[in-house]
Image (cartoon, helix red, strand yellow):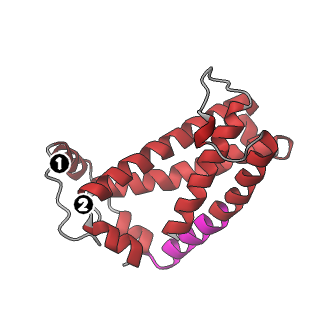
Amino acid sequence: MHWLNALAVVVLMMSGWRIYNATAFLGLAIPKSITLGGWLGGALQWHFAAMWVLSVNGSLYLAVNLASNRLRHKFFPLSARTLAADILAALKGRLAHADPQHYNMVQRLAYLFVMLDSVLLVASGLVLWKSVQFPLLRDLLLGYEGARRVHFFAMAALAAFVAIHLVMVALVPRTLVYMVRGR
C-alpha cells in the first residue's frame, strides 16, 4: 500500500502543479518540466485517475490499520515530553533507529500528520471537483477559493513530508529494506 500511495501522490502532485498553472492564483508558476498532463484537460485526467487510486488505497490502508489495531499500536500513545526529546535528538543527529519496526515519536507524529493531511486533501479536493454537491464541506473550507488554498497548502505540506521522508531514508538506508519488503 505504501508504494501505491507513493506513486499516486507523485502523479497527483505533478498533475496538480499543471492544474495550478492554469490559474497560478498565488502569482507563481511551477516549471512545466516537472508537471504532468501536457495541458489542463490532460492534467485533470491524470489527477482524477490518481485521486481514485489514492482514495481507495488510502481507505483500505486506514481500514486495515483500524481493524488490525495497528493504528493504535504503532502510532499511540503520543507524549509531548518524548516528542521534545526525540526532536532534540534528531536536531543533534542522534535520533535512535535501532528497531525500524518501532516508530519514534517524531515518526509517529509525522505519519499521523500525513494521514490527517490526506483526509484534508481529499475533503478539499471534493469541494474543488464537485463544489455544488458538497455545500457543507465547501462552507467549512471557507468557500471554493478557501478550499483551493487549503488544497494547495495541504499538498505543499505533503510534498515537504515526502522530501523529509526521502532525506531520512537516505540517512538511515537500512529502513529502505523494510519499506521495500513491507516488514
**Gap between marks 2 and 1 measured at Cα:** 19 Å
Which residue: 66% across, 67% down?
A: 56
Q: Which of marks 2 and 1 is in front?
A: 2
Circle 1 SS class: helix
Total number of numbered labels? 2
Residue 31 placement: quadrant: top right
- 10 Å neighbourhood of mark 2: few (<14), some, or many (≥20)? few
| Of 53 and 108, the residue lying toward us | 53
The residues colored magenta run 55-69
Q: In this view, does 58 lie above or below 69?
A: above
Q: Which amino acid does label 1 sit on?
A: Ala
Percent x, y for residue 112?
43, 55
Residue situated in front as seen by the camera: 183 or 61: 183
The residue wearing badge 1 is: 85
- Residue 137 vs residue 122, the one in the foreground: 122
Question: Taking 18 as reference, is 1 left or right?
Answer: left
Q: Which amino acid does label 2 sit on?
A: Val
Where does residue 61 sit, x and y in percent of width and height? 54, 70
Q: Position of residue 64 (x, y in %)?
A: 53, 76
Q: Residue furthest front?
A: 33
Q: Which residue is drawn at 66% across and 43% down?
A: 16
**Label of residue 130 in the image:** none
Residue 64 highlighted magenta (yes or no): yes
In the image, residue 64 sits, relative to residue 127, either above or below, namely below
Give the residue number, with chain letter if any, for mark 2: 172
